[in-house]
Image (cartoon, rainbow, N blue to C red):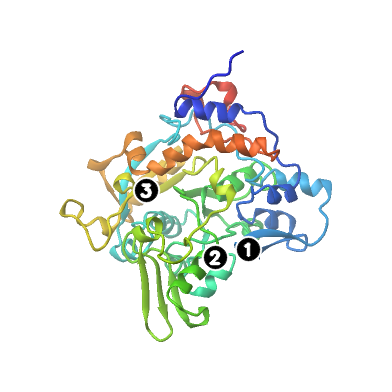
């Protein structure tokens, strides 16, 4: 039969899913094939005496360090949760969303909004959307703690695994801000699960993938109440902060604070203050688009991010994403009147499950979250404001093909909750959602 070439995004996604492939056969193969996302779930499941997350050169990436040979039972156990081995879905989730899109995924409700507290809105990374939802969960007693990433406030934070558990408002607000750095959010999740506390997880889509995998296998019965995520544009390698410091001839021991985003949306990216009080900052637009003169490019990414099958948090209850036109915030020195106030920060808040939609509604009713009913987005709005994610969808097929043709394992392709309602053939749905 003549091979049909993909002609649009949906064809590409179907062929990507149908591509013959095998998953990794060991955790070691996950790492060697470039499929590790540094989530830390392997350490949480196997224990630090077997595997621990450590930085590895030359790119300063967090990777599992093996302290002994894993048994076949341990390999089977860890591959059930590893997002580098399997990205699927929760059983029974099909048909629960109102509508679906091959790129954006499914949703129950979409809103444009921001944190109600002006201080939270200003200091948090993106209008404080996720912070507001997490704060409501704590203050309402729906959960007892929030598992999330520690922001990079001090330079030493960038050399830690970045996992944080907040149980009070003060702890949560102390963890506001972005962390454009390697993060093993799930490294200590077993302690939270064993404590029996009700918790919510805020993480990158790959962290959410691992948690969903775990809830269906080794972490059945865990008191995880909500999964909150972001639209992820990949995160830079650990060498990026060092390159920025080198650009400005700053020694790491002289750094007082090192922040990514926050203090406005998007804010400086990064912003550095030395112990002597000197400030150095790069505008967010410059960071992503302007290569430094006479210097190697600031940011490089791991291969797993370029192969990522779930960059829009398809398995989260709620996902929050930036909503600048064409994903291009204006430079702080050239703001136009028509976009005045944009740097105050607002985001798209996409609830993918009825549970997530209920959380968004309750947070608004409690006065923690502000929603703009006259700015309710749709699929086309998200595509317009997240065009890089559309491009990533278009490259999935070719990247996965190249990876597979190089004799590397390819994890099963994720498909969205509620995929039965789309035009995609049922037999191409991945995981356990069909």
Q: Residue at image x 54%, y 65%?
A: 239
**Distance in Å between CA atoms under marks 1 and 2:** 8 Å
Establish if 415 lies above or below 311.
Answer: above
Q: Residue at image x 36%, y 58%?
A: 128
Q: Nearer the viewer, residue 186 or 403?
A: 403
Q: Nearer the viewer, residue 274 or 422?
A: 274
In contact (CB < 8 Å): disc 1 and disc 2: yes
What numbered label is drawn on residue 362?
Answer: 3
Q: Which residue is mark 2?
A: 239
Establish if 402 lies above or below 155.
Answer: above
What numbered label is drawn on residue 58?
Answer: 1
Q: Nearer the viewer, residue 297 or 87?
A: 297
Q: Secondary structure at mark 3?
A: helix
Residue 373 in which image quadrant: top left
**Distance in Å between CA atoms under marks 2 and 3:** 41 Å
Furthest-left residue in this view: 337
Q: Secondary structure at mark 2?
A: helix
Going from the N terminus, do you reach mark 1 or mark 3 first? 1
**Distance in Å between CA atoms under marks 1 and 3:** 46 Å
Visible in this render: residue 430? yes
Instruction: State the quadrant of the C terminus.
Output: top right
């Amino acid at each position: 039969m003549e091979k049909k070439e993909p002609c649009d995004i949906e064809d590409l996604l179907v062929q990507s899913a149908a591509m013959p492939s095998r998953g990794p056969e060991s955790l070691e193969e996950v790492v060697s094939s470039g499929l590790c996302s540094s989530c830390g779930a392997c350490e949480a499941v196997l224990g630090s005496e077997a595997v621990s997350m450590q930085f590895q050169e030359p790119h300063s990436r967090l990777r599992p360090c093996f302290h002994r040979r894993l048994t076949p039972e341990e390999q089977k156990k860890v591959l059930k949760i590893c997002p580098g081995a399997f990205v699927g879905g929760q059983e029974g989730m099909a048909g629960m969303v109102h509508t679906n899109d091959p790129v954006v995924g499914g949703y129950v409700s979409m809103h444009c909004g921001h944190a109600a507290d002006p201080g939270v809105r200003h200091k948090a990374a993106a209008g404080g959307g996720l912070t507001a939802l997490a704060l409501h969960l704590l203050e309402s007693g729906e959960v007892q703690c929030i598992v999330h990433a520690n922001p990079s406030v001090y330079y030493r934070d960038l050399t830690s695994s970045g996992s944080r558990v907040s149980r009070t408002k003060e702890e949560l607000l102390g963890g506001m801000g972005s962390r454009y750095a390697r993060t093993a959010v799930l490294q200590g999740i077993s302690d939270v699960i064993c404590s029996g506390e009700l918790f919510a997880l805020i993480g990158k889509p790959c962290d959410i993938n691992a948690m969903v995998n775990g809830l269906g296998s080794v972490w059945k019965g865990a008191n995880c109440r909500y999964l909150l995520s972001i639209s992820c544009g990949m995160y830079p390698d650990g060498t990026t902060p060092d390159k920025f410091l080198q650009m400005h001839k700053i020694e790491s021991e002289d750094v007082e604070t090192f922040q990514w985003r926050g203090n406005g949306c998007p804010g400086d990216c990064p912003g550095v203050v030395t112990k002597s009080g000197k400030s150095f900052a790069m505008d967010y637009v410059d960071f992503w688009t302007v290569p430094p003169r006479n210097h190697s490019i600031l940011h490089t990414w791991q291969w797993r991010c370029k192969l990522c099958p779930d960059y829009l948090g398809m398995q989260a209850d709620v996902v929050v994403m930036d909503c600048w036109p064409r994903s291009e915030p204006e430079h702080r020195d050239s703001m136009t009147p028509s976009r005045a106030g944009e740097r105050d920060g607002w985001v798209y808040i996409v609830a993918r499950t009825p549970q997530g939609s209920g959380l968004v509604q309750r947070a608004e009713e409690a006065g923690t979250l502000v929603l703009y009913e006259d700015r309710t987005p749709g699929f086309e709005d998200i595509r317009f404001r997240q065009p890089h994610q559309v491009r990533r969808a278009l490259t999935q097929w070719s990247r996965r093909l190249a990876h597979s043709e190089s004799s590397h394992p390819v994890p099963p392709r994720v498909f969205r909750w509620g995929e039965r309602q789309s035009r995609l053939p049922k037999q191409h749905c991945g995981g356990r959602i069909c």
